[in-house]
Image: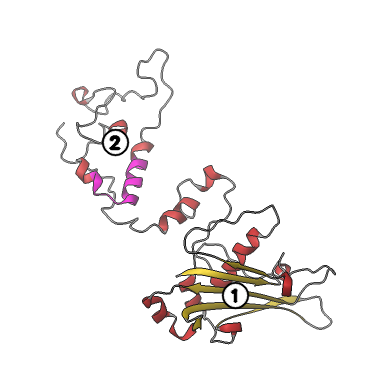
């Protein structure tokens, strides 16, 4: 299924009535293009509020999210409606009690209604949020467990590509890879039992390959070489590490290994089964 229609009323840049926003989408990739402060982020956040997202950021509708009209007055209601179309058989079974027929087709409508409330005689403000299904939000309430089934992966704006795309738990890269189908299909990497053949390397999962290359790279970070060293950038073997008969510098990888592995081959950590 996919998000086919989005209606936003009273939320940030989008007013109510004729000033509300209504967007229709097609299956596939959608790009939002516009000037700064034109409402692109508001559209994304409206979807996040209604459908939830799987990122680790905590968010909820704030009093500042309510639209301010031309008279500099805050509206008191935010309404966001997401229409999800092309539900498969499994989707229809999962959301059976929340489905609606639109134009003869089965759809799922998610209606978020937020009200800005205040205690009489007090400056205290808070927001009451209800999420229901059906036309005009008159269907059954959508419990959190149901909404979590609709949650999508959200990637915040990329400001620092080098930092955000670095490896590490919680990084942008880890969020992307976590949702890649088949990321763990294959063998795991074992630093104490390195792959001995190209076939063994090919059997590693995508995650295993990443860990393998990272393990090889950690011990191959070039150290400053002495002036005139014809192997500049390659640290010479430390005396006593291994018998001299086992050293060949620069190191040579076994014939037939992939080029990327040959470039990082370490004779000081021979794969299991390799004859010295």
Q: Report whether 256 appears left or right of 129.
A: left
Q: Quadrant of residue 132?
A: bottom right
Marked residue nearer the N-terminal end (2 or 1): 1
Question: Is 235 above or below relative to 167?
Answer: above
Which corner quadrant holds the N terminus?
bottom left
- The residue lying at 16 percent from left, 36 percent from top is 274
Residue 223 shows in this picture? yes
Rate crowding at label 1 as few (under 14), some (14 to 19) or many (20 or more) other CA atoms within 10 Å: many
Question: Is 100 above or below relative to 44?
Answer: below
Residue contact between numbered discs 2 and 1, judged by CB atoms under 8 Å: no
Q: Look at discs 2 and 1 and give the one toward the viewer.
A: 1
Residue 16 shows in this picture? no
Q: Position of residue 226 (x, y in %)?
A: 41, 17
The magenta stretch spans residue 205? yes
The magenta stretch spans residue 197? no
Q: Magenta stretch: give its range.
A: 201-215
The circle on residue 261 is: 2
Rate crowding at label 2 as few (under 14), some (14 to 19) or many (20 or more) other CA atoms within 10 Å: some
C-alpha span from label 2 to label 1: 52 Å
- The residue lying at 52 percent from left, 48 percent from top is 164
Which corner quadrant holds the C terminus?
top left
Q: Position of residue 71 (x, y in %)?
A: 85, 69
Which residue has dot 1 on it? Answer: 81
Q: Position of residue 13 (x, y in %)?
A: 72, 64
Q: Report whether 230 appears left or right of 156.
A: left
Q: Residue furthest front?
A: 103
Q: Main secondary structure of the magenta part?
A: helix
Question: Is 3 above or below relative to 154?
Answer: below
Label 2 sits on a secondary structure element that is helix
């Amino acid at each position: 299924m996919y998000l086919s229609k989005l209606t936003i009323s009273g939320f940030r840049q989008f007013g109510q009535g004729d000033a509300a926003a209504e967007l229709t989408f097609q299956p596939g990739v959608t790009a939002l293009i516009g000037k700064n402060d034109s409402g692109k982020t508001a559209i994304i956040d409206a979807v996040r509020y209604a459908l939830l997202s799987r990122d680790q950021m905590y968010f909820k509708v704030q009093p500042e999210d309510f639209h301010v009209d031309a008279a500099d007055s805050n509206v008191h209601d935010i309404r966001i409606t997401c229409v999800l179309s092309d539900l498969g058989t499994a989707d229809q079974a999962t959301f059976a009690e929340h489905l609606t027929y639109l134009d003869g087709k089965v759809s799922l409508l998610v209606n978020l209604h937020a009200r800005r409330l205040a205690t009489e005689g007090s400056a205290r403000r808070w927001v009451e949020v209800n999420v229901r299904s059906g036309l005009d939000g008159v269907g059954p309430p959508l419990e959190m467990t149901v909404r979590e089934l609709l949650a999508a992966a959200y990637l915040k704006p990329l400001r620092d590509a080098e930092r955000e795309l670095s490896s590490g738990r919680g990084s942008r890269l880890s969020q992307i890879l976590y949702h890649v189908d088949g990321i763990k299909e294959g063998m795991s990497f074992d630093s104490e039992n390195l792959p001995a053949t190209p076939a063994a390397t090919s059997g590693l999962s995508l995650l295993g390959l990443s860990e393998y290359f990272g393990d090889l790279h950690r011990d191959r970070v070039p150290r400053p070489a002495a002036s005139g060293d014809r192997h500049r950038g390659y640290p010479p073997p430390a005396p006593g590490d291994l018998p001299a008969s086992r050293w060949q510098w620069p190191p040579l990888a076994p014939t037939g290994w992939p080029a990327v592995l040959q470039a990082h081959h370490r004779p000081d950590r021979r794969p299991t089964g390799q004859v010295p």
